[in-house]
C-alpha cells in the first residue's frame, strides 16, 4: 500500500517474504545514524497482524507461547517465542492484550502462514469453538517510528485516548489514538534498540500517516538499516539466530521463557535450562570493517566450533560485529576465537551482549 | 551518463588511460556499481607489484549489506593502489570516477582497451541491465 511512496522517494525495492519492500533510501549508514541520533520510520507492513479472540483466547495463547497471556494486563504488550514440542522456535512475536478475550499478535512476515497453520492445529482440536483467529495483515499498514526523538515527534502529531500524549505510554504498552483524521494503534515497542513506537492503521491511512511522520522530520529507513540496528542491539532474527531447530535457551532468550506452565515445548526447555545447552549464541567483535556473514565458520585454535548467524559492519560502534553459535565451552566474554572469512582467518573476541545499549 | 574519457566492462569496472607512452591506466568501479553496492565499508585489494588479468578476480568490495568480487578490467602489473580507500572506502561512493580510483596498472597490451565498452555502450548496457 505504501509501495508507490517508497518508489517515489527513490527507495531500492526487493522482494521479501512475498512483499516488495524498501531495502534502503538514502543509504544504510545514514539511516542507522538517524535512528541512533534522531528518528527514522520503517514500513513494516509485511509483518503479520493476527487478531486472536474468544472466551479461551488467553488460555490458548498460554498454551502456544513461552510468555503468559492470561497474566498480561489489558494495555500491555509482551515479547516471547512460539515453540514446537522439541523447544525449537517456530517464530518470535510481540503480542498485545486488547481486552478480556482479545489479543493482537505480530508474527514475522515469512512465518505468518506457518504460525497460522500451527495455531489452527490447536484451535480446531483442544480449543475448538473457544478461539477465533482473524488475519488482519492485508487490510492494515504497520509503520515503525524509532529513535531518541520518536516520542517528541509523535507527541507533536498524535493523541491517544483521553487526550494523553504518546510519550505517556510506558515501554511495551499500547494505546488507541488519532493522528490527523486517522485512527491509529500505538504500541511503544520496536526492533532497533532505541525508544520508539509501532503504529498500525487502516490500509488507506498508511500513506497519509507515513507522510505526516516524514514531514515532522523522521527519516525514511529501509530493511537494510533495520537489520543493522537490530544486530547492534543483539535482537534475534528468525531464520538466522532462531529457527525450528534452535531453542530459546541456546539463543540466550531464557528471560522470555516461563519456567513453569503447560505450554508447548516446556518440558524440553525446562530440561535444557536445567542441564545447559550444548551450544550458545555469542556476540563477536572483529577489528576492522570486513564483516563475517551468515554461515562462516567460527574457529578456536583452528578447529571449527560453530558458525556465524548474522554479521555486519556496525556504523554505531565503527567496527565489525557478528552473532553466532559456538560450543558451550567457548562462550565466555573475553574468549579469543577466529572467523574464517572466505578463506582468510580473522581474530574475533566474544563480548557481552548487546553490542549497543542505549542506556550506556 | 558515464564519462567518455575511459572504457568499461560488463562487471562495472572502468579503465582510463593516463599515459599512452607508459601504457598506464587508472582502474575503478562505476557510479552504477557503487550505487548498487550501497555504503562501501571495506576493500580487499592486491598489492603494488602484483599482476592482474582481464576479468580475473583481483579483490573484494564489501558494503554494509554484502560482499562482491572485483574483477580486473585489464591485464598488466599494478603500479599503485589507492591507499586512501583503507580509511575512507566511502570515497568510491562519493566520487567513483576520480578520487575513488582503485589502482593504477601498466597494461601488457595497449590494444586490450579497444575490446572494452565505450561510455555510450556501457550506458546502454546498464540501461538494459
Image: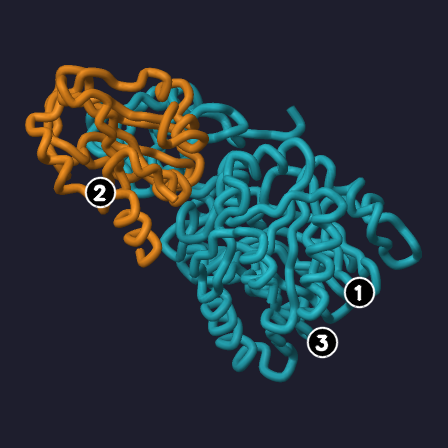
Given contact means CB atoms under 8 Å apart, are the residues at marks 1 and 3 in contact? no
Nearer to the camera, A358 or A204: A204
Could you say whether the residue bearing mark 2 is in a helix, strand or loop? loop
Q: Do discs 1 and 2 belong to a common subunit? A: no
Chain ID for label 2?
B
The orange-coloured chain is labelled B
**Residue B40 in the image: above or below residue A90:** above
- Give the residue pinned by disc 3: A55
- The residue drawn where x is 43% and y is 28% is B90
Query: Disc 1 sits on a residue from what chain?
Result: A
Residue A279 seen: no
For the residue carrying disc 1, how many other residues have a C-alpha within 10 Å: few (<14), some (14-19), or many (20+)?
some
Badge 2 is on which residue? B9
Q: Is residue A9 visible?
A: yes
User: What residue is shown with label 1?
Assistant: A182
Farthest residue, direction left: B109
Residue in the picture at 54% in, 48% down: A222
Residue A219 horizontal/vertical position (percent): 64, 43
Amino acid at each position: 500500500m505504501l509501495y508507490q511512496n517508497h518508489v517515489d522517494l527513490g527507495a531500492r525495492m526487493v522482494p521479501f517474504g512475498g512483499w516488495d519492500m524498501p531495502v534502503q533510501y538514502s543509504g544504510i549508514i545514514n539511516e542507522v545514524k538517524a535512528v541512533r541520533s534522531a528518528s527514522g520510520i520503517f514500513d513494516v507492513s509485511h509483518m503479520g497482524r493476527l487478531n486472536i479472540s474468544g472466551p479461551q483466547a488467553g488460555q490458548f495463547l498460554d498454551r502456544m507461547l513461552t510468555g503468559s497471556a492470561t497474566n498480561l494486563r489489558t494495555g500491555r504488550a509482551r515479547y516471547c517465542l512460539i515453540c514446537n514440542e522439541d523447544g525449537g522456535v517456530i517464530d518470535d512475536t510481540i503480542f498485545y492484550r486488547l481486552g478480556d478475550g482479545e489479543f493482537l499478535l505480530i508474527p514475522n512476515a515469512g512465518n505468518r502462514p506457518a504460525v497460522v497453520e500451527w495455531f489452527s492445529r490447536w484451535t480446531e482440536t483442544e480449543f475448538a469453538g473457544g478461539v477465533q483467529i482473524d488475519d488482519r495483515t492485508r487490510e492494515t499498514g504497520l509503520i515503525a517510528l524509532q529513535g531518541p526523538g520518536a516520542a517528541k515527534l509523535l507527541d507533536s502529531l498524535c493523541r491517544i485516548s483521553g487526550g494523553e500524549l504518546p510519550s505517556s505510554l510506558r515501554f511495551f504498552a499500547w494505546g488507541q489514538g488519532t493522528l490527523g483524521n486517522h485512527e491509529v494503534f500505538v504500541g511503544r515497542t520496536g526492533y532497533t534498540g532505541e525508544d520508539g513506537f509501532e503504529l498500525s492503521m487502516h490500509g488507506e491511512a498508511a500513506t497519509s500517516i507515513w507522510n505526516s511522520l516524514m514531514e515532522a522530520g523522521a527519516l525514511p529507513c529501509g530493511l537494510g538499516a533495520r537489520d543493522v540496528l537490530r544486530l547492534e542491539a543483539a535482537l534475534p532474527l528468525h531464520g538466522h539466530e532462531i529457527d525450528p531447530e534452535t531453542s530459546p535457551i541456546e539463543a540466550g532468550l531464557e528471560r522470555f521463557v516461563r519456567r513453569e506452565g503447560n505450554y508447548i515445548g516446556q518440558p524440553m526447555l525446562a530440561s535444557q535450562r536445567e542441564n545447559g545447552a550444548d551450544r550458545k549464541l555469542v556476540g563477536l567483535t572483529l577489528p576492522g570493517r570486513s564483516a563475517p556473514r551468515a554461515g562462516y565458520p567460527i574457529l578456536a585454535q583452528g578447529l571449527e566450533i560453530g558458525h556465524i548467524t548474522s554479521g555486519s559492519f556496525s556504523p554505531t560502534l565503527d567496527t565489525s560485529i557478528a552473532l553466532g553459535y559456538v560450543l558451550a565451552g567457548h562462550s565466555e566474554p573475553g574468549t579469543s576465537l577466529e572467523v574464517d572469512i572466505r578463506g582468510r582467518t580473522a581474530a574475533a573476541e566474544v563480548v557481552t551482549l548487546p553490542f549497543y545499549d542505549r542506556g550506556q | 551518463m558515464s564519462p567518455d574519457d575511459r572504457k568499461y566492462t560488463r562487471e562495472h569496472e572502468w579503465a582510463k588511460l593516463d599515459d599512452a607512452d607508459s601504457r598506464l591506466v587508472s582502474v575503478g568501479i562505476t557510479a552504477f556499481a557503487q550505487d548498487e553496492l550501497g555504503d562501501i565499508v571495506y576493500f580487499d585489494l592486491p598489492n603494488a607489484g602484483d599482476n592482474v588479468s582481464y576479468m580475473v578476480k583481483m579483490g573484494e568490495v564489501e558494503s554494509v549489506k554484502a560482499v562482491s568480487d572485483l574483477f580486473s578490467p585489464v591485464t598488466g602489473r599494478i603500479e599503485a593502489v589507492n591507499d586512501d580507500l583503507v580509511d575512507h572506502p566511502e570515497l568510491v561512493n562519493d566520487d567513483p570516477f576520480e578520487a575513488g580510483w582503485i589502482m593504477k596498472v601498466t597494461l601488457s597490451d595497449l590494444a586490450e582497451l579497444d575490446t572494452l565498452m565505450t561510455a555510450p555502450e556501457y550506458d546502454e548496457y546498464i540501461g538494459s541491465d
